[in-house]
Amino acid sequence: MPGGVEISPTIDRVWLDQASSDDPVAHAYAVWDLANSPDRVRFVSARSPGGTEGYLLWWTGHPSVPIVHWVGGESVARELAQALPPRPLVVVAPSRVRGAIVEARGPAREFGLLLLVRETGERPGASSDATERSGVRRLAGADRPAVTAWAATQEGSEVAEYRTFDPELEVAWGAFDGGSPVGVARAAVRLPAIWVLAGVYVAPEARRRGWGRRLVEAVAAASSAAGARLLTFVREDSRSARGLYESVGFRRTGRRLWIDAGAGIEP
């Protein structure tokens, strides 16, 4: 245990539960994945005599490469960086640990990500009846063939997971124009205190027609009805996306780096 730091291939559940109670935003993915996808995640924790200093949440469910969320751990950055999976990979991490990651896994492309949170007290999104009339609805089992077939024709990492999407196991909304899918969004995490909005995608030919906003409003309405805040990540350089989320009540609460070490995947 050099320097009093121990690297462990697990997570202290008692510590995680307390940490999540104090900061549900930071630990939303860890708590959700442990409960719902334990076979698709791995953990690496850095522990000192004082307790857990930080951890890596390694998502193995991406079709091509591991996606790793780095939580805390500036004081043990070198130890955690050495525990990362080999290239290629993507690490979503605080900017302060960037140097340790690049030193351990080589050159990388970087994109700034903003953490945006919509509080439950914000004005409600469109009602379920209104979104249904607008062509947006929560996806059901009967929608699966059309949505997966449509997703297979689309390009981009944000739509890739919809190619094997199962509405019976996941909660998502679809935008339909004349009965055909043109966009999707999902609630990737649904905890009592926090939901995570992810996978917002609109087909190129259907953009700038309000579909993205209607999808975001549908998820926001559902999270508000559940009494949960809604978290999402947005690229820092995407002014249009930031403007959309801010108009629906999201506010910036933090920043991360998307560090692409040989994966060739943009956020």
Image (tube, rainbow, N blue to C red):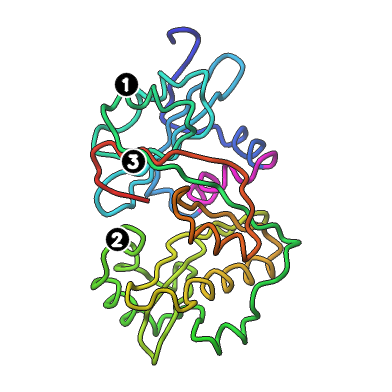
Name the disc covering residue 156, or none.
2
| Residue 256 vs residue 5, the one in the foreground | 256
For the residue labelled by badge 2, is the local secondary structure a helix, a strand or a loop?
loop
The picture quadrant where one finds residue 167 is: bottom left
The mark that comes first in sequence, 2 or 3, is 3
Secondary structure of the magenta portion, mostly? helix
- The type of residue carrying mark 3 is Val
Query: Residue sitting at 67 percent across and 36 percent down?
Result: 18
Instruction: Pick the quarter of the image with the N terminus.
Output: top left
Where residue 138 appears, as percent x and y from the top left, is 51, 78
For the residue labelled by badge 3, is the local secondary structure a helix, a strand or a loop?
strand
Which residues are the magenta region? Answer: 21-35
- The type of residue carrying mark 1 is Glu
Where residue 258 appears, as percent x and y from the top left, is 40, 41
Q: CA distance from mark 1 to mark 3?
A: 15 Å
| Residue 67 vs residue 111, the one in the foreground | 111
